[in-house]
Amino acid sequence: MEAPADDLTPDQIRLWTPTGVENLLNAWRELFPEFVGSIDPRRFLGRALNPQQSGWVFEHWVCSAFRMIAAEATASEDRSRSGWRWR
């Protein structure tokens, strides 16, 4: 089993910005491999994580997801002025 990336810091995690929904979902699959039936360790950008790092990544993931939803909703409002639209 691979040792966690002890040098991964919250600042390094915050530098990651998902490029789209698929990129965000890939990060989720790495962070929670048990949801896809894998026994692999939790990862972020291919690096094994310890429990504290997993928490930092989860926190950043949630914030990124909300930012992405807000950006899409704002763009949708700007185009149609019809309010929130979910896909």
Image: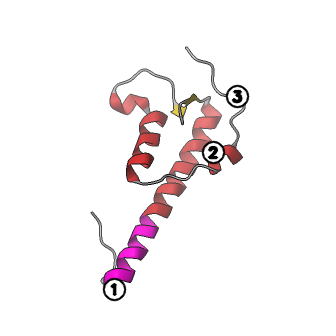
Circle nearer the N terminus (3, 1):
3
Q: Circle 2 is placed at which residue position?
A: 13
**Residue placed farthest to the bottom in the image?**
81
Q: Residue 41 placed where, x, y %?
A: 51, 24
Circle nearer the N terminus (2, 1):
2
Check contact, mark 3 vs mark 1: CB within 8 A.
Answer: no
**Residue placed farthest to the front in the image?**
19
**Residue placed farthest to the left in the image?**
87
Q: CA distance from mark 3 to mark 1?
A: 47 Å
Q: What residue is drawn where x is 63% and y is 36%? A: 53
Between 2 and 55, which is closer to the camera in this rendering?
2
Let me know if residue 78 is in the magenta part: yes
Mark 1 residue type: Arg
> Which mark, residue 81?
1
Q: CA distance from mark 2 to mark 1?
A: 35 Å
Q: Circle 3 is placed at which residue position?
A: 6
- Under circle 3, the secondary element is loop
Count residues near mark 2 (Cα–Cα under 10 Å), then give few for <14, some for 14-19, many for 20+. Answer: some
